[in-house]
Amino acid sequence: MVDLTEAQKDVLKAEGHQLVVGGPGSGKTTVSILKAAKIAREKLKPGQRILFLSFARATVSRVFEAIDEERSVTKEEKKLIEVDTYHSFFWRILKAHGYLVGFPRRMTILTPPNEAIALSVIRSGFKANSKLSPEEKAQKAALEVAERTRLATEEGKVCFDLFAERVAVLLHGSTKVRDLVSTMYPFIILDEFQDTSAEQWRAVEAIGRSSTLIALADPEQRIFDFIGADPERLNHFIEAFKPSTHDLAGENHRSKGTDIALFGNHLLTGKFREEPYQGIDFEGFASNPNQAFASLVAQVLNARKRLIEAGRKDWSLAILVPTKRMTRLVSDNLREPFGNVPPISHTAAVDMEGPILAAEVIAFLLQQRSHDGCFDEFVEVLCSFFHGRGGAAPTKGDLAEAARFRAALVKWNDCVAKGKAIPANSVLQATFAVHQAVAAVKLTGDPDADWMALRALLEAGECARLAEIAREARNVRLLERGTQLRQGLSQDWRDFGGYRNALAVTRQAFVQEHFATAHKPESGVVVMNMHKAKGKQFDEVIIFEGWPKRVKGEIVGNPDRIVGGNYRDGAMTQARQNFRVSVTRAKSRTTIMSPKDDICVLLIPAV
Ligand SMILES: Nc1ncnc2c1ncn2[C@@H]1O[C@H](COP(=O)(O)OP(=O)(O)OP(=O)(O)O)[C@@H](O)[C@H]1O
């Protein structure tokens, strides 16, 4: 067992609601787990459990890892600690009691890709978010809320965004439901409390009337302002519950023996010291793609070598980048580095809307239906892919593509009805040919082989859109991932001698996947957006940003920077906090890579 600090010991001793604050790696998660074990020993009645609520599945797996590391916690105690995401906890409440707040009794989850499809028409009526006036933003948000509400109340399709708000209404309105929750969970630990949104806060505020709340927070790791986190949140908690407050502030256990945490603190103020920071490396690179990626690959290879030589098993190296676009670019470059450097095996956290919808296209085809109107349905699935693949930001190009396919289908059906030949230049000719080829495939009942056979057909076929979909589908490791989908498809085959419900089975598998909590934390080389690194820890971190494009010495574009455009603008508090969160994810070393001729403005000392 670790030697707890005095402040950590106080957390274990105190009774009632608690607020535990402290910087990165100060031991908040660790002490909360020990506290949970103590509660399990001393306070729980049979059937009761302690709930540990977190934001994302990835953080949940970190917490599981931390629980496993805590050797002083017994197996029985571990069983009584239930780690869950807000989403999944709220969904459980809604499924049981949602009808009390206007939802139909039968509800399904509208997954993010399908939500993106449903909202794409509204969203595409507006310019990019950054170009909207506050009024336009409000108007867009109101339209989205109205449509989400309609989908939920009229069609029983509930998207994640509605969970917290409805649960808050439910818990404030019904003492009975609240008591049910508190009887089951008399103690609730709230992870990353500084990032709770107004709705999430309203929901836990209600539960706090009958359960004891233990909030863990680092106000300076607040990174979710854009979706409703509020600097005042800790004060809301203090006012409502008068908790005992425990400050683990100065401690840094994650990167002991280094100056990583210190550097993180200095980033907040922009006041750096002269002496180098142990564990922080800076690498400048030249502002062009070849040299930038070559420098990155060199750093990745060095870091990987260090970690392997250190003899750790399960080592982890994170490459953190500012944008989604950069995540893809880095991943592409690692897959095919320059010269004779072999591919660098890694996982990349790319947005899943496109890949999931691409998988749905394949699933639809696995059904091999042949009824009238089957081709129409296929075109509709294809159009859904274009509507949804951009997630919250559908592109005009994708929506135009969907419109073009739909218009071509009307023409197509018109020709068929009139017995006329279909125009040879119809965009659907190639699509139809692939559809026919798929219908002729003899499926075997082995889901892996069949899935791959269809994907290969799409990839090799004449239709460029379907080939693109097949490539997107490669990003979902659906069949490797677990047995849920494979079992579902096999069962389907056994029941019907074909994959009659493949699309429904696939959608269900993704919902399950979203709620699954037993994943291992990432290991090996991982590439992800800086935002996604919150709450995680890695052995080494490389932070890599974009570079300016110059024409005749003048900067004409500066994409993918840690600070948009790399402009200095006021206090830049939010950007500083984000940067600090990324820097402090490392246990032993953080390498910061920024263009030599336009260094990240946050690294330039404040005067
Ligand atoms: N008192 C202690 N002595 C030594 N090591 C500790 C102590 N407390 C925690 N640790 C270790 O320090 C690391 C970071 O701790 P933990 O994850 O609990 O921090 P945290 O405050 O939750 O971090 P963050 O907010 O950055 O996610 C862990 O590997 C943990 O085992």
Image: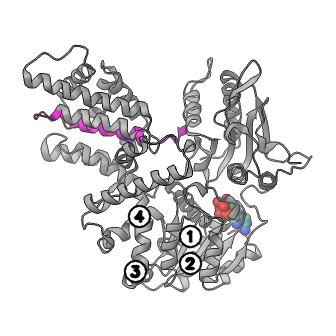
Extent of the magenta region: 346-374
Q: Which of the image's four quarters has the N terminus?
A: bottom right
Circle 1/circle 2 CB separation < 8 Å: yes
Point out which mark residue 462 bears.
none
Q: Classify mark 1 as within 8 Å of ligand 1 or not, answering yes or no.
A: no
User: Magenta includes 348?
Assistant: yes
Residue 366 drawn above or below residue 463: below
Where does label 3 land, which residue?
Answer: 173
Does residue 362 appear in the picture of this structure? no
Q: Residues within 10 Å of mark 2 (few under 14, many from 20)?
A: many
**Residue labelled with disc 4:** 163
Residue under the image location 40 percent in, 68 percent down: 166
Specify the label residue 213 is tagged with.
2
Label 3 element class: helix
Which is in the foreground here, disc 4 or disc 1?
4
Q: Which amino acid does label 4 sit on?
A: Phe
* Residue linked to disc 1: 190
Q: Residue at x 33, y 27 (%)?
A: 466
